Image (tube, helix red, strand yellow):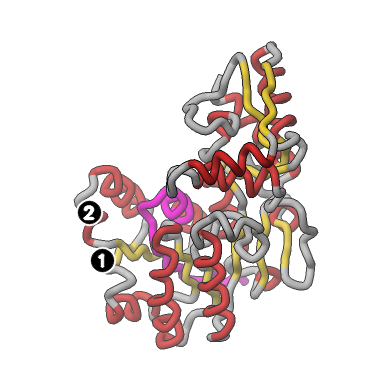
């Protein structure tokens, strides 16, 4: 007998990750609905994405997290909700959680996380509540007894990696490079379409229910020194490495205005503090995606850097 696939509501399908999630969901033959705000239809880029998805089978419901009745109507048609709103809007999910409770049919909720584990980061004095807002949503989900899966994919390859983690640069350097800390702390990069494939694979998997799925692909869990080593081999040239100490980086973060300093905060968190990799994944509440789904072929950092040559 063919397995019965969950029906999925995705909120934020016009965003970079939301678009990939919708594509992955449709590719995996889930009935997929997208909740789309009115403004999504007047932005040419978003409209193009919506046309593509709708041709691929996405059902579109016009509305937002603020339209409670429309939201409940959409929720009643599905079993699973994946929220992919931007981190600036993460507190808007406070409206979604009571609606999920009211609809009373949702078997699993994926809040909008898709970054570092907000309960494990150690930069709360620097990040202007960036991570605590996400933790707030987790606590609310758990308090309300809503079944969940949290996805912690760390960094996207489209963020920081195109510049080899050089703030202000748009492409990788070919002469000198700044390394933050001692350059040996490992961070993790995963391509958005791969994050989407892993996420959709968990939807009907009992092994991921009420757990956190961490993505730490072996070929993508690298220190700054290792990333630069890979790039040097590709361009056949050694770069001059300038090391910036933890103290100097913190000084820079404090000198800069918020939100301009957030890129530096994220670099500090990942590559100095080691917030993406300092802890072991505890099997009682966490699983690692590439171990759970070895069949998923993901883009490695080395393959991604090939596209920048």
Q: Give x and y (percent) for residue 82.
A: 48, 66
Mark 2 element type: helix
- Sequence-wise, the earlier of marks 2 and 1 is 2
**Left or right of 167 in this view: 273:** right
Q: Determine the residue positioned at 63% across, 27% down.
A: 178
Instruction: In the rendered view, tell whether residue 83 sits above or below residue 239.
Output: below
Q: Is 11 one of the magenta-colored residues?
A: yes
- Residue nearest the viewer, comparing 51 with 121: 121
Q: Is residue 2 in view from this perspective?
A: no
- Residue nearest the viewer, comparing 278 with 157: 278
Query: What is the number of callouts on the image?
Result: 2
Q: Give x and y (percent) for residue 231.
A: 66, 22
- Tag 1 residue: 62
- Tag 2 residue: 41
Mark 1 element type: strand
Q: Few, some or many C-alpha atoms within 10 Å of disc 1 (few <14, some 14-19, many ≥20)? A: some
**Left or right of 241 in this view: 71:** left
Circles 2 and 1 in contact, beta carbons < 8 Å: yes
**Label for residue 174?**
none
Q: Toward which corner of the image does residue 201 lie, by quadrant? A: bottom right
Instruction: In the rendered view, tell whether residue 47 sits above or below residue 219.
Output: below
- Residue nearest the viewer, comparing 273 with 115: 273
Q: Determine the residue positioned at 61% across, 14% down.
A: 175
Magenta span covers which residues?
1-22
Q: Is 49 one of the magenta-colored residues?
A: no
Quadrant of the rendering where the C terminus is positioned: top right
Residue at the extreme top: 237
């Amino acid at each position: 007998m063919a397995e019965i696939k969950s029906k999925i509501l995705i909120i934020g399908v016009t965003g970079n990750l939301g678009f990939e999630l919708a594509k992955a969901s449709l590719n995996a033959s889930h009935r997929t609905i997208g909740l789309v705000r009115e403004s999504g239809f007047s932005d040419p880029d978003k409209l193009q994405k919506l046309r593509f998805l709708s041709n691929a089978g996405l059902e579109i419901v016009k509305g937002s997290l603020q339209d409670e009745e429309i939201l409940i109507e959409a929720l009643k048609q599905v079993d699973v909700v994946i929220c992919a709103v931007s981190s600036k809007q993460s507190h808007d999910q406070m409206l979604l959680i009571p609606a999920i409770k009211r609809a009373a049919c949702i078997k699993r909720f994926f809040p909008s996380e898709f970054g570092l584990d907000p309960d494990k980061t150690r930069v709360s004095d620097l990040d202007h509540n960036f991570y605590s807002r996400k933790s707030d949503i987790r606590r609310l989900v758990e308090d309300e007894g809503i079944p969940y899966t949290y996805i912690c994919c760390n960094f996207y390859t489209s963020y920081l990696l195109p510049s080899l983690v050089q703030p202000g640069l748009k492409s990788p350097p070919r002469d000198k490079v700044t390394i933050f800390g001692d350059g040996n702390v490992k961070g993790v990069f995963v391509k958005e379409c791969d994050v989407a494939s892993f996420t959709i694979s968990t939807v009907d998997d009992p092994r991921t229910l009420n757990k956190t799925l961490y993505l730490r692909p072996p070929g993508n869990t690298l220190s700054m020194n290792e990333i630069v080593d890979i790039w040097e081999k590709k361009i056949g040239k050694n770069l001059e490495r300038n090391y910036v100490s933890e103290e100097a980086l913190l000084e820079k973060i404090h000198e800069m205005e918020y939100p301009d300093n957030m890129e530096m905060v994220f670099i500090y968190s990942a590559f100095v503090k080691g917030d993406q990799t300092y802890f072991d994944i505890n099997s009682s509440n966490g699983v690692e995606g590439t171990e759970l789904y070895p069949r998923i072929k993901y883009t490695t950092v080395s393959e991604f850097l090939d596209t920048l040559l």
